[in-house]
Image (cartoon, rainbow, N blue to C red):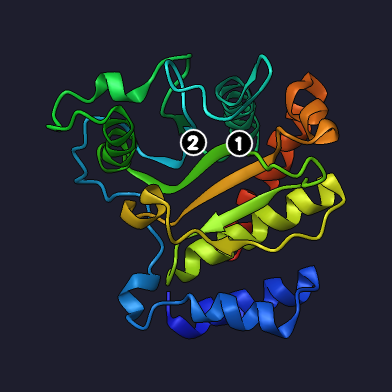
Amino acid sequence: MKLAKLAGATLAICLFFGYSDSMYAAALAAAPANEQDNLPFTAPGPNYRGALPYAEVLIDAGHGGIDGGTFHEDVLEKHINLAVSKKLHARLQQLGVSSVLNRSDDYALSDDNRWLGSRSRHQRDLSQRTELTQEIHTGLLVSLHVNWSKRSAAHGPVVLHQKNRGESALLALCIQDALNQQQKTNELPRAGSPFYLLNTVKQPAVIVEMGFISNEADRRMLTSDKGQDKLAEAIASGVRQYKLFFR
């Protein structure tokens, strides 16, 4: 994929979704100077001998086990992340997009990490998530999370992308727009510079903050079966829209 084509795709999606010139400039600035970095992370060739089959999307269900994530009273983020991840997996399969979950139950990925010499459970958890992106050959990573704020009025989805990665910024734009339409918001995706996962994963990757557990309306959506269905539908729609730009 040439740099010009990636820039054209970014411009097209910004115009289609009604984003401003400044948003296009920011997304385009995220495109790397080295055109090799613009090549999509494609399916392996016939000589691929990986232990696991190729999947187009790796779904990262944030937190799990002893790590409950953020919370409100007895509502834990980890349960929301896993529920929506399972629904997203099912919806992507319906759309013909192969996907895999990095956890299918309530357990901490740090428990599987016996190779990193660190006393930090959090560091072992993050390292294990990154390691799985190398062991499982996938095209992109979508990490699902829930936000929290001291301000109960704070609401809505925010999608974070890798800094200086044009494909990641484009994926974030697609998912952000789909979520904005679902939740009637006008948020813009942002570079998630401080986040370990985004800084270490080689594939195009995004972190999807699906809503605020600290906001009553968002919390109702995040914890209801219908709301979770709509979240999964929106995120899957964004992933599919992103893939259309690379046909």
Cα–Cα span, label 1 and label 2: 10 Å
Circle 1 sits on which residue? 92
Q: Which of marks 1 and 2 is nearer the N terminus?
A: 2
Residue 236: tell me if it is visible: no
Of residues 119 and 163, the one drawn nearer to the viewer in this rendering: 119
Residue at figure coordinates x 47%, y 14% from the top left: 105
Q: Is residue 181 above or below residue 170?
A: above
Q: Is residue 64 left or right of residue 11?
A: left
Residue at figure coordinates x 25%, y 46% from the top left: 46
Dot 2 falls on a residue whose secondary structure is strand
Q: In this view, does 76 lie above or below 53?
A: above
Looking at the rendering, which quadrant does residue 2 occupy?
A: bottom left
Q: Which quarter of the image is occupied by the C terminus?
A: bottom right
Categorize mark 2 by other alpha carbons within 10 Å: few (<14), some (14-19), many (20+): many
Residue 224: tell me if it is visible: yes
Of residues 173 and 111, the one drawn nearer to the viewer in this rendering: 111
Q: Which amino acid does label 1 sit on?
A: Leu
Q: Which disc is residue 210 wearing?
A: none
Circle 2 sits on which residue? 59
Measured from the top left, where is residue 57 in percent x and y? 47, 42
Q: What residue type is labelled 2?
A: Ile
Dot 1 falls on a residue whose secondary structure is helix
Question: Is label 1 or label 2 in front?
Answer: 2
Q: Which quarter of the image is occupied by the N terminus?
A: bottom left
Measured from the top left, where is residue 100 in percent x and y? 45, 31
Measured from the top left, where is residue 245 in percent x and y? 59, 65
